[in-house]
Amino acid sequence: MCGIVGYVGKENALPRVLDGLNFLEYRGYDSAGVAYFTNGKIKITKEVGRISVLEKKLPKDIYTNMAIGHTRWATHGEASKINSHPHRQGKFTVVHNGIIENYAELKKELKKAKVKFISETDTEVIPALLNYYYQQEPNILKCIQKLKNKVTGSYALGIICDDDQDHLYATRCGSPLIIAKAAKGNFIASDVPAILKYTNKYYLLDEYEIAQISMNKITIYNADLKEITKEELTFAGQAESILLNGYEHYMLKEIHEEDQVFLDTFNYYVTDNKFKKTMPHLKNYRQIHIVACGSAYYVGLIGKFLIERLAQIPVTVEVASEYRYQENFYNKQTLVIIISQSGETADSLAALRKAKEDGIDTLAIVNVIGSSIAREATYTLYIKAGPEIAVATTKAFLAQTTLMALLAIHISNRLDLLKHFNGLEQKIKYLLQQDYRQYAKAIYQEENIFYIGRQMDYALCLEGALKLKETSYINGVAYQAGELKHGTISLIKENTPVIGIATEAKVMAKTISNIKETKARKAQVILITNQDVPDKCYDKLIMIPKVHEIVSPILTVIPLQLIGYEVAKLRGCDIDKPKNLAKSVTVE
Ligand code: M6R
Protein backbone atom coordinates (compact mmCIF):
# COMPACT_ATOMS: atom_id res chain seq x y z
CA MET A 1 0.00 0.00 0.00
CA CYS A 2 1.22 3.57 0.44
CA GLY A 3 4.99 3.97 0.45
CA ILE A 4 7.02 6.50 2.41
CA VAL A 5 10.60 7.62 1.82
CA GLY A 6 12.48 10.51 3.41
CA TYR A 7 16.10 11.62 3.33
CA VAL A 8 18.20 14.19 5.16
CA GLY A 9 21.90 14.36 4.34
CA LYS A 10 24.85 15.95 2.62
CA GLU A 11 23.75 14.79 -0.81
CA ASN A 12 20.82 15.79 -2.97
CA ALA A 13 17.70 14.49 -1.27
CA LEU A 14 15.22 14.48 -4.17
CA PRO A 15 16.86 11.83 -6.38
CA ARG A 16 17.30 9.63 -3.31
CA VAL A 17 13.66 9.94 -2.33
CA LEU A 18 12.50 9.29 -5.90
CA ASP A 19 14.79 6.24 -6.16
CA GLY A 20 13.29 4.93 -2.96
CA LEU A 21 9.73 5.51 -4.16
CA ASN A 22 10.54 3.65 -7.38
CA PHE A 23 11.68 0.66 -5.33
CA LEU A 24 8.43 0.79 -3.38
CA GLU A 25 6.28 0.80 -6.54
CA TYR A 26 5.49 -2.86 -5.96
CA ARG A 27 3.41 -1.89 -2.92
CA GLY A 28 0.78 -0.46 -5.27
CA TYR A 29 -0.21 3.21 -5.68
CA ASP A 30 -2.20 5.58 -7.83
CA SER A 31 -0.55 8.96 -7.14
CA ALA A 32 2.77 10.23 -5.83
CA GLY A 33 4.20 13.36 -4.27
CA VAL A 34 7.25 14.95 -2.65
CA ALA A 35 7.98 17.86 -0.31
CA TYR A 36 11.36 19.54 0.12
CA PHE A 37 12.92 22.77 1.34
CA THR A 38 14.55 25.15 -1.07
CA ASN A 39 15.90 28.57 0.05
CA GLY A 40 14.19 28.01 3.38
CA LYS A 41 10.75 27.55 1.81
CA ILE A 42 8.71 24.35 1.49
CA LYS A 43 7.82 23.10 -1.99
CA ILE A 44 5.27 20.35 -2.61
CA THR A 45 4.73 18.59 -5.94
CA LYS A 46 2.08 15.88 -6.42
CA GLU A 47 0.76 14.04 -9.44
CA VAL A 48 -1.81 11.35 -10.18
CA GLY A 49 -0.36 8.24 -11.84
CA ARG A 50 3.15 6.86 -11.98
CA ILE A 51 6.25 8.28 -10.28
CA SER A 52 7.65 9.03 -13.75
CA VAL A 53 4.82 11.58 -14.20
CA LEU A 54 5.82 13.26 -10.94
CA GLU A 55 9.52 13.24 -11.91
CA LYS A 56 8.74 15.13 -15.12
CA LYS A 57 7.03 17.88 -13.11
CA LEU A 58 10.02 18.46 -10.81
CA PRO A 59 12.60 21.14 -11.65
CA LYS A 60 15.85 19.53 -12.83
CA ASP A 61 18.25 21.89 -11.06
CA ILE A 62 17.00 21.56 -7.47
CA TYR A 63 19.54 20.68 -4.80
CA THR A 64 18.03 20.08 -1.39
CA ASN A 65 19.28 18.32 1.71
CA MET A 66 15.94 17.15 2.98
CA ALA A 67 12.88 15.69 1.27
CA ILE A 68 9.95 13.40 1.99
CA GLY A 69 8.05 11.43 -0.63
CA HIS A 70 4.98 9.26 -0.85
CA THR A 71 3.11 6.89 -3.13
CA ARG A 72 -0.61 6.83 -2.30
CA TRP A 73 -3.07 3.98 -2.69
CA ALA A 74 -6.41 5.76 -2.42
CA THR A 75 -8.63 4.88 0.54
CA HIS A 76 -10.32 8.12 1.70
CA GLY A 77 -11.04 10.20 -1.37
CA GLU A 78 -10.30 9.51 -5.03
CA ALA A 79 -6.83 9.46 -6.56
CA SER A 80 -6.35 13.19 -7.20
CA LYS A 81 -3.63 15.79 -6.74
CA ILE A 82 -5.40 17.30 -3.74
CA ASN A 83 -5.77 13.97 -1.98
CA SER A 84 -2.18 12.92 -2.73
CA HIS A 85 0.48 13.26 -0.06
CA PRO A 86 2.39 15.14 1.32
CA HIS A 87 -0.33 17.02 3.23
CA ARG A 88 0.35 20.32 4.87
CA GLN A 89 -1.30 22.40 7.59
CA GLY A 90 0.41 25.47 9.06
CA LYS A 91 4.08 24.67 9.59
CA PHE A 92 3.79 20.89 9.27
CA THR A 93 4.09 18.71 6.18
CA VAL A 94 3.38 15.02 6.49
CA VAL A 95 3.41 11.73 4.55
CA HIS A 96 1.31 8.90 5.97
CA ASN A 97 0.77 5.20 5.47
CA GLY A 98 -2.21 3.64 7.27
CA ILE A 99 -5.73 4.76 8.18
CA ILE A 100 -6.81 7.31 10.78
CA GLU A 101 -10.04 5.75 11.98
CA ASN A 102 -11.30 8.71 14.03
CA TYR A 103 -10.45 11.30 11.37
CA ALA A 104 -14.06 12.53 10.98
CA GLU A 105 -14.33 13.29 14.68
CA LEU A 106 -10.89 14.97 14.68
CA LYS A 107 -11.80 17.07 11.65
CA LYS A 108 -14.94 18.25 13.40
CA GLU A 109 -12.96 19.22 16.49
CA LEU A 110 -10.24 21.01 14.52
CA LYS A 111 -12.78 22.87 12.39
CA LYS A 112 -14.05 24.41 15.61
CA ALA A 113 -10.49 25.71 16.10
CA LYS A 114 -10.77 27.34 12.64
CA VAL A 115 -8.70 24.77 10.78
CA LYS A 116 -9.63 24.53 7.08
CA PHE A 117 -9.27 21.20 5.32
CA ILE A 118 -8.73 21.00 1.60
CA SER A 119 -8.61 17.26 0.93
CA GLU A 120 -11.01 14.39 1.52
CA THR A 121 -8.29 12.36 3.20
CA ASP A 122 -8.04 11.03 6.71
CA THR A 123 -4.35 12.03 6.71
CA GLU A 124 -4.84 15.78 6.69
CA VAL A 125 -5.86 15.74 10.35
CA ILE A 126 -2.29 14.77 11.27
CA PRO A 127 -0.48 17.95 10.14
CA ALA A 128 -3.48 19.90 11.43
CA LEU A 129 -3.21 18.34 14.88
CA LEU A 130 0.57 18.80 14.97
CA ASN A 131 0.20 22.45 14.02
CA TYR A 132 -2.51 22.94 16.60
CA TYR A 133 -0.37 21.43 19.36
CA TYR A 134 2.65 23.43 18.15
CA GLN A 135 0.77 26.69 18.54
CA GLN A 136 0.21 25.76 22.20
CA GLU A 137 3.81 24.62 22.82
CA PRO A 138 6.42 24.80 20.03
CA ASN A 139 8.14 21.51 20.80
CA ILE A 140 7.98 19.17 17.82
CA LEU A 141 8.76 15.99 19.76
CA LYS A 142 6.02 16.71 22.29
CA CYS A 143 3.55 17.47 19.49
CA ILE A 144 4.26 14.09 17.87
CA GLN A 145 4.05 12.36 21.24
CA LYS A 146 0.53 13.74 21.74
CA LEU A 147 -0.73 11.90 18.63
CA LYS A 148 -0.58 8.62 20.54
CA ASN A 149 -3.53 9.43 22.78
CA LYS A 150 -5.49 11.36 20.22
CA VAL A 151 -5.39 9.34 17.03
CA THR A 152 -6.89 5.88 16.56
CA GLY A 153 -6.07 3.65 13.61
CA SER A 154 -2.75 2.89 12.01
CA TYR A 155 0.01 5.16 10.88
CA ALA A 156 3.59 5.43 9.78
CA LEU A 157 4.45 9.11 9.47
CA GLY A 158 7.24 11.15 7.95
CA ILE A 159 7.05 14.69 9.31
CA ILE A 160 8.86 17.94 8.53
CA CYS A 161 8.36 21.33 10.17
CA ASP A 162 9.19 24.73 8.65
CA ASP A 163 10.85 25.80 11.91
CA ASP A 164 13.34 22.92 11.98
CA GLN A 165 14.82 22.40 8.54
CA ASP A 166 17.68 20.26 9.89
CA HIS A 167 15.55 17.39 11.14
CA LEU A 168 13.20 14.86 9.68
CA TYR A 169 10.80 13.22 12.16
CA ALA A 170 9.10 9.84 12.03
CA THR A 171 6.78 7.76 14.16
CA ARG A 172 4.55 4.74 13.73
CA CYS A 173 1.66 2.70 15.09
CA GLY A 174 0.50 -0.38 13.21
CA SER A 175 2.11 0.47 9.85
CA PRO A 176 5.75 -0.39 9.14
CA LEU A 177 8.63 2.09 9.08
CA ILE A 178 12.40 1.74 9.10
CA ILE A 179 15.13 4.28 9.77
CA ALA A 180 18.32 3.74 7.75
CA LYS A 181 21.86 5.02 8.16
CA ALA A 182 23.94 5.75 5.05
CA ALA A 183 27.44 7.21 4.66
CA LYS A 184 26.35 10.76 3.93
CA GLY A 185 22.84 10.95 5.28
CA ASN A 186 19.90 9.13 6.79
CA PHE A 187 16.61 7.76 5.52
CA ILE A 188 13.13 6.80 6.60
CA ALA A 189 11.24 4.25 4.48
CA SER A 190 8.27 1.90 4.52
CA ASP A 191 10.42 -1.06 3.54
CA VAL A 192 14.04 -2.10 3.11
CA PRO A 193 14.16 -2.21 -0.74
CA ALA A 194 13.72 1.59 -0.76
CA ILE A 195 17.14 2.18 0.78
CA LEU A 196 19.26 -0.71 -0.50
CA LYS A 197 20.85 1.33 -3.28
CA TYR A 198 22.48 3.52 -0.59
CA THR A 199 22.81 1.40 2.53
CA ASN A 200 21.92 -1.95 4.10
CA LYS A 201 22.04 -0.71 7.72
CA TYR A 202 18.75 0.08 9.34
CA TYR A 203 16.68 0.21 12.54
CA LEU A 204 13.12 -0.98 12.99
CA LEU A 205 10.92 1.60 14.63
CA ASP A 206 8.60 0.09 17.24
CA GLU A 207 5.07 1.25 18.05
CA TYR A 208 4.90 4.91 19.16
CA GLU A 209 8.66 5.40 19.05
CA ILE A 210 9.73 8.71 17.55
CA ALA A 211 12.83 9.24 15.42
CA GLN A 212 14.52 12.63 15.10
CA ILE A 213 16.91 12.45 12.20
CA SER A 214 19.55 14.91 11.04
CA MET A 215 22.35 14.60 8.49
CA ASN A 216 24.71 12.97 10.98
CA LYS A 217 22.55 11.65 13.74
CA ILE A 218 19.58 9.40 14.36
CA THR A 219 17.99 9.82 17.78
CA ILE A 220 15.17 7.50 18.76
CA TYR A 221 12.80 8.15 21.66
CA ASN A 222 10.25 5.89 23.28
CA ALA A 223 6.65 6.96 23.83
CA ASP A 224 7.71 8.80 27.03
CA LEU A 225 10.31 10.76 25.04
CA LYS A 226 13.21 8.95 26.72
CA GLU A 227 16.15 8.46 24.35
CA ILE A 228 16.66 4.75 23.61
CA THR A 229 19.30 2.64 21.88
CA LYS A 230 18.10 0.41 19.05
CA GLU A 231 19.75 -2.63 17.57
CA GLU A 232 21.27 -1.85 14.18
CA LEU A 233 20.18 -4.43 11.60
CA THR A 234 21.92 -5.37 8.37
CA PHE A 235 20.03 -6.57 5.32
CA ALA A 236 21.94 -9.73 4.47
CA GLY A 237 20.97 -10.13 0.81
CA GLN A 238 22.47 -8.32 -2.13
CA ALA A 239 20.82 -5.16 -3.41
CA GLU A 240 20.80 -6.96 -6.78
CA SER A 241 18.33 -9.46 -5.33
CA ILE A 242 15.64 -6.86 -5.83
CA LEU A 243 16.67 -5.93 -9.35
CA LEU A 244 15.26 -7.58 -12.45
CA ASN A 245 18.54 -9.27 -13.45
CA GLY A 246 17.55 -9.49 -17.11
CA TYR A 247 14.02 -10.84 -16.54
CA GLU A 248 11.18 -8.99 -18.18
CA HIS A 249 9.09 -8.92 -14.99
CA TYR A 250 9.60 -9.49 -11.28
CA MET A 251 6.88 -12.12 -11.34
CA LEU A 252 8.86 -14.20 -13.83
CA LYS A 253 12.14 -13.61 -12.03
CA GLU A 254 10.62 -14.64 -8.73
CA ILE A 255 9.08 -17.81 -10.17
CA HIS A 256 12.49 -18.72 -11.56
CA GLU A 257 14.03 -18.35 -8.10
CA GLU A 258 11.79 -21.09 -6.73
CA ASP A 259 14.27 -23.97 -6.82
CA GLN A 260 16.69 -21.92 -4.70
CA VAL A 261 13.97 -20.58 -2.42
CA PHE A 262 12.84 -24.16 -1.79
CA LEU A 263 16.39 -25.23 -0.91
CA ASP A 264 17.04 -22.19 1.29
CA THR A 265 13.81 -22.73 3.25
CA PHE A 266 14.35 -26.48 3.61
CA ASN A 267 18.03 -26.17 4.62
CA TYR A 268 17.18 -23.50 7.17
CA TYR A 269 15.09 -26.00 9.14
CA VAL A 270 16.48 -29.41 8.27
CA THR A 271 19.90 -30.98 8.19
CA ASP A 272 20.72 -34.69 7.69
CA ASN A 273 17.01 -35.52 7.61
CA LYS A 274 16.52 -34.05 11.09
CA PHE A 275 15.04 -30.77 12.27
CA LYS A 276 17.45 -28.14 13.52
CA LYS A 277 16.79 -26.12 16.68
CA THR A 278 15.08 -23.51 14.47
CA MET A 279 11.79 -25.46 14.93
CA PRO A 280 9.92 -24.71 18.18
CA HIS A 281 8.38 -27.41 20.36
CA LEU A 282 4.75 -27.68 19.17
CA LYS A 283 3.69 -31.16 20.14
CA ASN A 284 1.33 -30.23 22.99
CA TYR A 285 -1.23 -28.40 20.88
CA ARG A 286 -4.44 -30.35 20.24
CA GLN A 287 -6.21 -27.94 17.90
CA ILE A 288 -4.90 -25.54 15.28
CA HIS A 289 -6.44 -22.46 13.67
CA ILE A 290 -4.70 -21.18 10.56
CA VAL A 291 -5.52 -17.56 9.75
CA ALA A 292 -4.37 -15.64 6.67
CA CYS A 293 -5.48 -13.68 3.59
CA GLY A 294 -5.39 -14.30 -0.16
CA SER A 295 -2.75 -16.73 -1.32
CA ALA A 296 -1.46 -17.20 2.21
CA TYR A 297 -4.95 -18.48 3.13
CA TYR A 298 -4.70 -21.08 0.35
CA VAL A 299 -1.36 -22.22 1.79
CA GLY A 300 -3.28 -22.59 5.04
CA LEU A 301 -5.77 -24.92 3.31
CA ILE A 302 -2.89 -27.10 2.10
CA GLY A 303 -1.51 -27.02 5.63
CA LYS A 304 -4.84 -28.22 7.03
CA PHE A 305 -4.85 -31.33 4.87
CA LEU A 306 -1.22 -32.15 5.65
CA ILE A 307 -1.41 -31.57 9.41
CA GLU A 308 -4.74 -33.39 9.79
CA ARG A 309 -3.55 -36.36 7.73
CA LEU A 310 -0.20 -36.71 9.46
CA ALA A 311 -0.80 -35.49 13.00
CA GLN A 312 -4.54 -36.24 13.38
CA ILE A 313 -5.07 -32.80 14.92
CA PRO A 314 -8.16 -30.84 13.85
CA VAL A 315 -7.26 -27.75 11.87
CA THR A 316 -9.60 -24.95 10.82
CA VAL A 317 -8.54 -22.37 8.24
CA GLU A 318 -10.01 -18.90 8.42
CA VAL A 319 -9.82 -15.73 6.38
CA ALA A 320 -8.23 -13.14 8.67
CA SER A 321 -10.75 -10.37 7.95
CA GLU A 322 -13.53 -12.63 9.30
CA TYR A 323 -11.64 -14.28 12.15
CA ARG A 324 -11.68 -11.50 14.70
CA TYR A 325 -15.43 -10.94 14.36
CA GLN A 326 -16.56 -14.54 14.75
CA GLU A 327 -16.78 -17.00 17.61
CA ASN A 328 -13.47 -18.82 17.88
CA PHE A 329 -13.70 -21.90 20.01
CA TYR A 330 -10.19 -22.12 21.26
CA ASN A 331 -8.63 -23.26 24.48
CA LYS A 332 -5.21 -23.39 26.07
CA GLN A 333 -4.20 -26.22 23.74
CA THR A 334 -5.03 -24.23 20.62
CA LEU A 335 -2.28 -22.87 18.43
CA VAL A 336 -3.15 -20.02 16.06
CA ILE A 337 -0.92 -20.00 12.99
CA ILE A 338 -0.76 -16.74 11.01
CA ILE A 339 0.69 -16.97 7.50
CA SER A 340 1.83 -13.75 5.85
CA GLN A 341 4.50 -12.96 3.27
CA SER A 342 4.75 -9.29 4.23
CA GLY A 343 4.10 -9.74 7.92
CA GLU A 344 2.20 -6.45 7.76
CA THR A 345 -1.24 -7.44 6.42
CA ALA A 346 -3.60 -5.48 8.65
CA ASP A 347 -6.31 -8.17 8.83
CA SER A 348 -3.80 -10.89 9.72
CA LEU A 349 -2.11 -8.67 12.30
CA ALA A 350 -5.48 -7.88 13.87
CA ALA A 351 -6.31 -11.61 14.05
CA LEU A 352 -2.95 -12.30 15.69
CA ARG A 353 -3.56 -9.58 18.27
CA LYS A 354 -7.05 -10.92 18.99
CA ALA A 355 -5.67 -14.41 19.67
CA LYS A 356 -2.96 -12.94 21.90
CA GLU A 357 -5.50 -10.88 23.85
CA ASP A 358 -7.42 -14.11 24.42
CA GLY A 359 -4.26 -15.70 25.83
CA ILE A 360 -3.72 -18.09 22.90
CA ASP A 361 -0.25 -19.02 21.60
CA THR A 362 0.50 -17.85 18.07
CA LEU A 363 2.94 -18.98 15.43
CA ALA A 364 3.80 -16.72 12.50
CA ILE A 365 5.01 -17.96 9.13
CA VAL A 366 6.47 -14.85 7.58
CA ASN A 367 8.90 -13.74 4.88
CA VAL A 368 9.80 -10.17 5.84
CA ILE A 369 12.24 -10.20 8.73
CA GLY A 370 11.31 -7.97 11.65
CA SER A 371 7.80 -7.27 10.32
CA SER A 372 4.99 -6.63 12.82
CA ILE A 373 3.50 -10.14 12.65
CA ALA A 374 6.96 -11.69 12.98
CA ARG A 375 7.71 -9.60 16.03
CA GLU A 376 4.41 -10.02 17.83
CA ALA A 377 3.83 -13.77 17.53
CA THR A 378 4.76 -16.24 20.27
CA TYR A 379 6.85 -18.22 17.75
CA THR A 380 8.05 -17.02 14.37
CA LEU A 381 9.21 -19.22 11.50
CA TYR A 382 10.68 -17.42 8.52
CA ILE A 383 10.42 -18.66 4.98
CA LYS A 384 13.59 -17.94 3.05
CA ALA A 385 12.11 -16.41 -0.09
CA GLY A 386 14.04 -13.10 -0.10
CA PRO A 387 12.37 -9.85 -1.16
CA GLU A 388 9.24 -10.44 -3.22
CA ILE A 389 8.43 -7.44 -5.40
CA ALA A 390 5.68 -8.56 -7.82
CA VAL A 391 2.23 -7.97 -6.35
CA ALA A 392 1.21 -11.53 -7.25
CA THR A 393 2.95 -13.78 -4.79
CA THR A 394 4.76 -16.80 -6.27
CA LYS A 395 8.03 -17.78 -4.62
CA ALA A 396 6.65 -16.91 -1.18
CA PHE A 397 3.69 -19.24 -1.82
CA LEU A 398 6.06 -22.06 -2.72
CA ALA A 399 8.23 -21.39 0.34
CA GLN A 400 5.19 -21.17 2.65
CA THR A 401 3.92 -24.48 1.25
CA THR A 402 7.35 -26.03 1.88
CA LEU A 403 7.32 -24.78 5.45
CA MET A 404 3.74 -25.97 6.05
CA ALA A 405 4.78 -29.45 4.92
CA LEU A 406 7.79 -29.35 7.26
CA LEU A 407 5.55 -28.17 10.09
CA ALA A 408 3.16 -31.08 9.51
CA ILE A 409 6.09 -33.49 9.69
CA HIS A 410 7.46 -31.80 12.80
CA ILE A 411 4.13 -31.82 14.65
CA SER A 412 3.45 -35.45 13.73
CA ASN A 413 7.06 -36.50 14.31
CA ARG A 414 7.06 -38.29 10.92
CA LEU A 415 10.75 -37.65 10.28
CA ASP A 416 10.79 -40.56 7.81
CA LEU A 417 8.95 -38.24 5.37
CA LEU A 418 11.79 -35.72 5.23
CA LYS A 419 13.51 -37.89 2.62
CA HIS A 420 10.84 -36.86 0.08
CA PHE A 421 12.26 -33.34 0.03
CA ASN A 422 15.67 -34.55 -1.13
CA GLY A 423 16.33 -33.59 -4.75
CA LEU A 424 12.96 -31.84 -5.12
CA GLU A 425 14.78 -28.70 -6.36
CA GLN A 426 15.67 -30.62 -9.55
CA LYS A 427 12.01 -31.37 -10.18
CA ILE A 428 11.16 -27.72 -9.54
CA LYS A 429 13.84 -26.75 -12.08
CA TYR A 430 12.42 -29.19 -14.60
CA LEU A 431 8.95 -27.63 -14.28
CA LEU A 432 10.39 -24.12 -14.55
CA GLN A 433 12.04 -25.03 -17.85
CA GLN A 434 8.81 -26.14 -19.57
CA ASP A 435 7.04 -23.88 -22.06
CA TYR A 436 3.57 -22.93 -20.82
CA ARG A 437 2.73 -20.49 -23.64
CA GLN A 438 0.70 -23.10 -25.56
CA TYR A 439 -1.71 -23.40 -22.60
CA ALA A 440 -1.86 -19.64 -22.18
CA LYS A 441 -2.61 -19.18 -25.89
CA ALA A 442 -5.55 -21.56 -25.57
CA ILE A 443 -7.22 -19.50 -22.86
CA TYR A 444 -6.00 -15.88 -22.86
CA GLN A 445 -8.98 -14.47 -24.75
CA GLU A 446 -11.54 -16.03 -22.42
CA GLU A 447 -13.33 -14.06 -19.72
CA ASN A 448 -14.24 -16.99 -17.42
CA ILE A 449 -12.05 -19.96 -16.62
CA PHE A 450 -12.94 -22.83 -14.30
CA TYR A 451 -10.40 -24.53 -12.04
CA ILE A 452 -11.55 -27.80 -10.52
CA GLY A 453 -9.92 -30.20 -8.09
CA ARG A 454 -10.41 -31.88 -4.74
CA GLN A 455 -8.67 -31.59 -1.33
CA MET A 456 -5.20 -30.02 -1.70
CA ASP A 457 -5.74 -29.81 -5.45
CA TYR A 458 -8.73 -27.58 -4.71
CA ALA A 459 -6.53 -25.24 -2.65
CA LEU A 460 -4.20 -25.10 -5.65
CA CYS A 461 -7.18 -24.36 -7.92
CA LEU A 462 -7.95 -21.36 -5.72
CA GLU A 463 -4.36 -20.17 -6.08
CA GLY A 464 -4.30 -20.72 -9.85
CA ALA A 465 -7.58 -18.83 -10.24
CA LEU A 466 -6.33 -15.93 -8.09
CA LYS A 467 -3.12 -15.65 -10.12
CA LEU A 468 -5.24 -15.32 -13.25
CA LYS A 469 -7.65 -12.81 -11.73
CA GLU A 470 -5.02 -10.50 -10.31
CA THR A 471 -2.55 -10.46 -13.21
CA SER A 472 -4.87 -10.92 -16.24
CA TYR A 473 -8.24 -9.63 -14.97
CA ILE A 474 -9.84 -12.87 -16.19
CA ASN A 475 -12.47 -14.30 -13.91
CA GLY A 476 -10.74 -17.51 -12.86
CA VAL A 477 -13.07 -19.41 -10.52
CA ALA A 478 -12.18 -22.44 -8.44
CA TYR A 479 -14.62 -25.22 -7.50
CA GLN A 480 -14.30 -28.39 -5.53
CA ALA A 481 -14.63 -30.86 -8.41
CA GLY A 482 -17.35 -32.85 -6.65
CA GLU A 483 -19.49 -29.75 -6.18
CA LEU A 484 -19.82 -28.95 -9.88
CA LYS A 485 -22.76 -31.25 -10.39
CA HIS A 486 -24.65 -29.43 -7.62
CA GLY A 487 -25.17 -26.36 -9.75
CA THR A 488 -22.15 -24.90 -11.47
CA ILE A 489 -21.99 -27.47 -14.22
CA SER A 490 -24.91 -25.62 -15.80
CA LEU A 491 -22.34 -23.00 -16.88
CA ILE A 492 -20.20 -25.48 -18.82
CA LYS A 493 -20.82 -25.38 -22.54
CA GLU A 494 -18.84 -26.00 -25.72
CA ASN A 495 -15.27 -24.69 -25.38
CA THR A 496 -15.66 -23.45 -21.79
CA PRO A 497 -12.07 -23.53 -20.49
CA VAL A 498 -11.60 -25.88 -17.53
CA ILE A 499 -8.28 -26.44 -15.78
CA GLY A 500 -8.57 -29.73 -13.90
CA ILE A 501 -6.03 -30.63 -11.23
CA ALA A 502 -5.77 -34.29 -10.30
CA THR A 503 -2.66 -35.19 -8.32
CA GLU A 504 -4.17 -36.64 -5.14
CA ALA A 505 -4.15 -40.43 -5.26
CA LYS A 506 -6.96 -40.68 -2.68
CA VAL A 507 -9.47 -38.84 -4.87
CA MET A 508 -7.90 -39.35 -8.30
CA ALA A 509 -10.63 -41.53 -9.80
CA LYS A 510 -13.39 -39.27 -8.50
CA THR A 511 -11.70 -36.08 -9.77
CA ILE A 512 -11.13 -37.64 -13.19
CA SER A 513 -14.87 -38.53 -13.38
CA ASN A 514 -15.75 -34.92 -12.55
CA ILE A 515 -13.37 -33.70 -15.26
CA LYS A 516 -14.98 -36.16 -17.70
CA GLU A 517 -18.36 -34.68 -16.82
CA THR A 518 -17.14 -31.31 -18.12
CA LYS A 519 -15.57 -32.93 -21.18
CA ALA A 520 -18.89 -34.63 -21.92
CA ARG A 521 -20.35 -31.12 -22.17
CA LYS A 522 -17.60 -30.21 -24.68
CA ALA A 523 -15.48 -28.14 -22.28
CA GLN A 524 -11.93 -27.37 -23.35
CA VAL A 525 -9.89 -29.15 -20.65
CA ILE A 526 -6.29 -28.60 -19.58
CA LEU A 527 -5.43 -31.40 -17.18
CA ILE A 528 -2.63 -31.11 -14.62
CA THR A 529 -1.83 -34.50 -13.16
CA ASN A 530 0.95 -36.84 -12.10
CA GLN A 531 -0.59 -40.10 -13.38
CA ASP A 532 -1.54 -41.69 -16.68
CA VAL A 533 -5.22 -40.97 -17.25
CA PRO A 534 -7.71 -41.83 -20.03
CA ASP A 535 -6.93 -39.54 -22.93
CA LYS A 536 -10.57 -38.78 -23.59
CA CYS A 537 -10.79 -36.50 -20.62
CA TYR A 538 -8.50 -33.64 -21.71
CA ASP A 539 -7.46 -31.48 -24.64
CA LYS A 540 -4.07 -30.53 -23.27
CA LEU A 541 -2.01 -32.27 -20.62
CA ILE A 542 0.58 -31.02 -18.12
CA MET A 543 2.44 -33.85 -16.39
CA ILE A 544 3.87 -33.18 -12.94
CA PRO A 545 6.63 -35.47 -11.64
CA LYS A 546 5.12 -38.09 -9.32
CA VAL A 547 6.22 -37.43 -5.75
CA HIS A 548 4.88 -38.09 -2.23
CA GLU A 549 1.72 -36.10 -1.41
CA ILE A 550 3.60 -34.19 1.31
CA VAL A 551 5.62 -32.34 -1.35
CA SER A 552 3.29 -32.61 -4.33
CA PRO A 553 1.65 -29.13 -3.98
CA ILE A 554 5.13 -27.56 -4.12
CA LEU A 555 5.41 -28.82 -7.70
CA THR A 556 1.80 -28.47 -8.84
CA VAL A 557 1.66 -24.73 -8.20
CA ILE A 558 4.46 -23.98 -10.69
CA PRO A 559 2.49 -24.50 -13.95
CA LEU A 560 -0.42 -22.57 -12.43
CA GLN A 561 1.86 -19.60 -11.73
CA LEU A 562 3.50 -19.71 -15.14
CA ILE A 563 0.18 -20.04 -16.97
CA GLY A 564 -1.02 -16.97 -15.01
CA TYR A 565 2.12 -15.10 -16.04
CA GLU A 566 1.95 -16.07 -19.73
CA VAL A 567 -1.77 -15.23 -19.98
CA ALA A 568 -1.14 -11.78 -18.45
CA LYS A 569 1.69 -11.23 -20.91
CA LEU A 570 -0.43 -12.20 -23.91
CA ARG A 571 -3.12 -9.77 -22.72
CA GLY A 572 -0.54 -6.98 -22.36
CA CYS A 573 -1.27 -6.43 -18.65
CA ASP A 574 0.92 -4.54 -16.19
CA ILE A 575 2.03 -7.83 -14.67
CA ASP A 576 4.00 -6.68 -11.62
CA LYS A 577 1.65 -3.88 -10.66
CA PRO A 578 -1.93 -4.96 -11.38
CA LYS A 579 -4.60 -2.29 -11.15
CA ASN A 580 -6.22 -1.63 -7.78
CA LEU A 581 -3.85 -4.00 -5.96
CA ALA A 582 -1.15 -3.47 -3.36
CA LYS A 583 1.62 -5.83 -2.33
CA SER A 584 1.09 -5.36 1.34
CA VAL A 585 -2.48 -4.62 2.39
CA THR A 586 -2.08 -2.49 5.49
CA VAL A 587 -5.72 -1.45 5.82
CA GLU A 588 -8.50 -3.59 7.28
O1 M6R B 1 1.60 -10.38 2.81
P1 M6R B 1 0.52 -11.42 2.97
O2 M6R B 1 0.98 -12.79 2.65
O3 M6R B 1 -0.15 -11.34 4.31
O4 M6R B 1 -0.57 -11.03 1.88
C1 M6R B 1 -1.77 -11.73 1.81
C2 M6R B 1 -2.51 -11.44 0.54
O5 M6R B 1 -2.77 -10.06 0.43
C3 M6R B 1 -1.69 -11.86 -0.69
O6 M6R B 1 -1.41 -13.23 -0.67
C4 M6R B 1 -2.46 -11.55 -1.99
O7 M6R B 1 -3.60 -12.34 -2.09
C5 M6R B 1 -1.53 -11.70 -3.18
N1 M6R B 1 -1.68 -10.58 -4.05
C6 M6R B 1 -1.76 -12.93 -3.96
O8 M6R B 1 -0.90 -13.02 -5.05
Image (cartoon, rainbow, N blue to C red):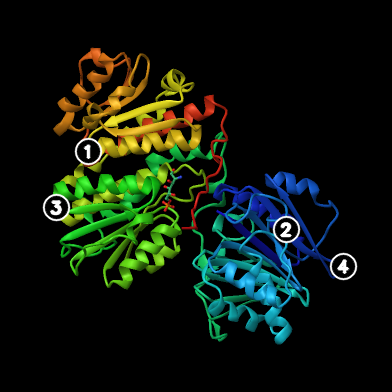
The CA span between labels 3 and 2 is: 53 Å
Image position, residue 122 (x, y; %): 61, 63
The CA span between labels 4 and 2 is: 16 Å
Mark 1 or mark 3, whichever is nearer to me: 1
Q: Secondary structure at mark 3?
A: helix
* Residue identifier under label 4: 39
Q: In the image, is residue 140 above or below residue 304?
A: below
* Residue identifier under label 3: 311
Residue located at (25% from left, 62% from top) = 328
Crowding near the residue tagged with mark 2, few <14, some 14–19, many ≥20 C-alpha atoms within 10 Å: many
Q: Is residue 451 left or right of residue 176?
A: left
Image position, residue 246 (x, y; %): 57, 35
Q: Quadrant of residue 560?
A: top left
- CB atoms at circles 3 and 4 under 8 Å apart? no
Mark 3 / mark 4, whichever is N-terminal: 4
* Residue identifier under label 1: 455
Mark 4 / mark 1, whichever is N-terminal: 4
Q: Secondary structure at mark 1?
A: loop
**Amino acid at pointer 1:** Gln
Crowding near the residue tagged with mark 1, few <14, some 14–19, many ≥20 C-alpha atoms within 10 Å: some
- CB atoms at circles 3 and 2 under 8 Å apart? no
The CA span between labels 1 and 3 is: 17 Å
Residue closest to the far left = 312
Crowding near the residue tagged with mark 4, few <14, some 14–19, many ≥20 C-alpha atoms within 10 Å: few
Mark 4 or mark 1, whichever is nearer to me: 1
* Residue identifier under label 2: 34
The CA span between labels 3 and 4 is: 67 Å
The CA span between labels 4 and 1 is: 65 Å
